Amino acid sequence: MVTSKPWGGRFSEPTSELVEQFTQSIDCDYRLYKYDIQGSIAHARMLTHVGILTAQECDSIINGLLSIEQDIENGVFEWSHKLEDVHMNIEAELTKRIGDAGKKLHTGRSRNDQVATDMRLFLRDTVDALVELLHALQTTLLDIADREAGTLLPGLTHLQVAQPVTLGHHIMAWFEMLARDRKRFSEARRRINISPLGSAALAGTSFPIDRSITAKGLGFDAVSENSLDAVSDRDFAIEFCAHAALLAVHLSRIAEELILWSSAQYRFVEIGDAFCTGSSIMPQKKNPDVAELIRGKSGKVIGNLVNMLVLVKAQPLAYNRDNQEDKIPLFSTVETVTECVRVLNAMLPTIKVNRSVMRDATEVGFSTATDLAEYLVGKGVPFRDAHEIVGKTVRFCVDNQLRLDQLSLAQLQGFSPVIEKDVTPVLTVDGSIRARNHVGGTSPEQVKAAIARARNRLVSEDGGPE
Ligand code: ARG
């Protein structure tokens, strides 16, 4: 053997340094060390149970691995590019520390089932942490929605004034997006939490292993059914990246609204100074950079999903080294969405709502025109005719620079004789809001009820940290 590689036996020339640098993944996969050690300990225990290792060898392996873990955590472990990845770095160091018992650890396993196991353990923890962070963000949104249940703002379609809504209702729309995201992650956890250990390189192993012992020891729900599939597919990680991309899209949409709302044109909200930055040239500037970065970082998360999909798409069974490239986009996705959820959750409570500005904005753009049409329908006018009548009324208001509620009863009756005095509250934004009093509607009463239901859902939903 001319190299110190664990696989060096059949080689007669040393690896080119260029190749060493090119094939190493330690710069990135060292992050899996905790899971690699957990997996190795479970594997050693199983090998002992089936009589492949002695109890003494097992103890020595476990102690060696724990001392390595300690050194990694204290930042004194030396990672080597020559040893390619986290698995070989730890195994080589184990043998250095405990001798021959270390060399027996890899019995009945391969780096192929080892890395698949590490990734699943890593993602399981990640999902649990993310679900908890989303839960915290949803709680923050609920508290703001509760506070702003009666605050009015113009609801928009096509970014044009459509109908008045309550800010509580708007915030609860954000809540619902995140509720689905959280649920998606919880559901993905079931498919992540399957043990590939024992699949070995691709075909299983001739050793009398007991896969249920390692699965149980690592907290997996079941063992994988097919060794070829278990070492090669990364759909569990792709699924995570897909859910993360959707989450990032939702966060980006929320961020976009905060950016618009904090502009001088809207002045609906003011983001706390601690969450804005200034300009190096324009002294007056206070920019919503945090929200902009949340919006911008969604590009990376979406790109990472595409990266993962393309990585896997043309791979024949079983394991191919291409799979090593899954870690870069996966870790990037985990870091980015975690950071974005955290920072948004911290920023939201600093936001001051300019209620009067929001309310004033509902008075322009004829936001109660639909209410007038619905009023006419109530008086027996077919909806299409009502739409036409109100269209003409709005045209008249535009030409004369009037709001709908500034028209006299006589003027209104000029457009339709069925209009009576009871039209007055219909044309006000408060009347419009109160009228939308059904489940899923925007009236303050309904928003309060939705918040109450949402609080219960946060306590009872599957996959929550409760
Ligand atoms: N570092 C590799 C990865 O992340 C581990 C598996 C390598 N297996 C192999 N046969 N070269 O995929």
Image (cartoon, grey):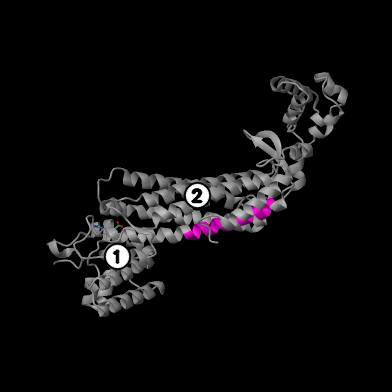
Horizontal side of 190 relative to 60 (left or right) equals: right
Q: Is residue 244 above or below residue 440?
A: below
* Number of on-image labels: 2
Q: State the residue in front, 349 or 212.
A: 212
Q: Label 2, on which residue?
A: 297
Q: Amino acid at mark 2?
A: Lys
Q: Is residue 392 above or below residue 255?
A: above
Disc 1 element: helix
Decide if residue 3 is on the left or right side of residue 180.
left
Q: Looking at the image, can residue 429 be seen?
A: yes
Per the image, the residue denoted by label 1 is 87
Of labels 1 and 2, the one closer to you = 1
**In the displayed image of the protein, which residue is found farthest to the bottom?**
56
Note whether ligand 1 is within 8 Å of mark 1.
yes
Specify whether 413 is left or right of 442: right
Residue 327 inside the magenta-drawn segment? no
Q: Is residue 301 above or below residue 69?
A: above
Q: Can you give x and y, in whole percent of width and height, for residue 388 in the image? A: 72, 20
Q: Position of residue 72 (x, y in %)?
A: 38, 72
Q: Are marks 1 and 2 in contact (CB under 8 Å)?
A: no
Label 1 – label 2 distance at C-alpha: 31 Å
Placement of the N terminus among the 4 image quadrants: bottom left
Q: Position of residue 98 (x, y in %)?
A: 26, 78
Q: Quick check: is 138 in the magenta stretch? A: yes
Find the magenta span and give its range: 128-145
